[in-house]
Image (cartoon, grey):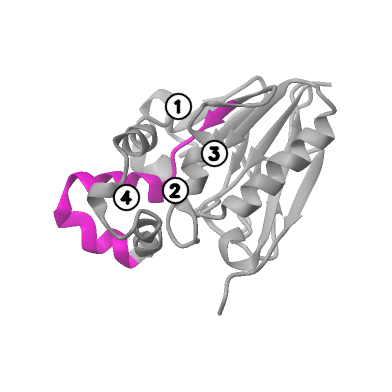
Amino acid sequence: MSLTYVIPDLHGRCDLLDEALAEISARSRGQAGVIVTIGDYVDKGPDSKGVIDRLLPGAIGDFSLVALKGNHDAMMVEALRDRSKMAAWLDKGGDAALACYGGDPAAVPPSHIAWLDGLKLIHVDAHRLYVHAGVDPQVPLDRQSATTLLWKRYAKGYPDGFGKFHVVHGHDNFPDGPLLYEGRSNLDTLAWRTGRLTVGVFDDDKPGGPVDLLVIRGRPAAP
């Protein structure tokens, strides 16, 4: 069985990422596979720099990594390249990310900025479509806007995917989730605050939602 493991919004929780990767490795028992991370590596949590350093090489053990961009990743790049956007980024959790680099925007390595900027917005395999926020079901994939892919929020209870594809996303957090529907899976459980990260496990040969969930439990954020 070939599996794809999907890690949602980390927001600086490198501790949860490390535990998730260890759990995936133990579960795979040496079998190669794919890990898809669906964005929002930075902001809010304590170690955005650590998350990027962990993922930057592009492969994790025997796993190939598909890293997608989230809206917070895009905001960080925009703020570091255009200081007129700095205040808005800091107000949305960028202050925690910047603290990882000693509080100095000039201390953020160019390699980190380039990695965040170059991340893909969408990934598609035989049965599923992976994206940070969502897709517009009325628009062809090659015409989806970056705004939609990074910022969309589905209507509450919306069950559909995108044509034949099951949509796997995060962005719109639900602490008691994940939210699993016939056509889409929202894996974002506000891990940076709750300490509970949910990794979706998908069978590459089987359409639909996850065949298993790996729940990583760590420290909740301090009040």
Q: Look at the picture and state if 96 lies above or below 70.
A: below
Residue 182 in sight? no
Tell which circle, 4 or 2, labels the residue nearer the N-terminal end.
Answer: 2
Q: Whole-Å distance between the Cαs marked 4 and 3?
A: 20 Å
- In the image, the segment drawn in magenta is 65-91
Q: Name the mark nearer the viewer: 1 or 4.
A: 4
Residue 142 in sight? yes
Q: Is residue 109 magenta?
A: no
The residue carrying pointer 1 sits among few (fewer than 14), some (14 to 19) or many (20 or more) residues within 10 Å by Cα, namely: few
Q: Which residue is mark 3?
A: 54
Q: Amino acid at mark 2?
A: Lys
Q: Amino acid at mark 1?
A: Leu
Q: Is residue 68 magenta?
A: yes
Q: Residue furthest bottom?
A: 223
Q: Main secondary structure of the magenta part?
A: helix
Pick the residue in front: 88 or 211: 88
The quadrant of the rendering that contains the N terminus is top right
Q: Name the mark nearer the viewer: 4 or 3.
A: 3
Q: Are marks 2 and 1 in contact (CB under 8 Å)?
A: no
Q: Which residue is mark 4?
A: 75
Residue 141 is labelled as 1
Tell which circle, 1 or 4, labels the residue nearer the N-terminal end.
Answer: 4
Q: Which residue is mark 2?
A: 49
Tell which circle, 3 or 1, labels the residue nearer the N-terminal end.
Answer: 3
Q: Whole-Å distance between the Cαs marked 4 and 2?
A: 15 Å
Mark 2 lies on a secondary structure that is: helix
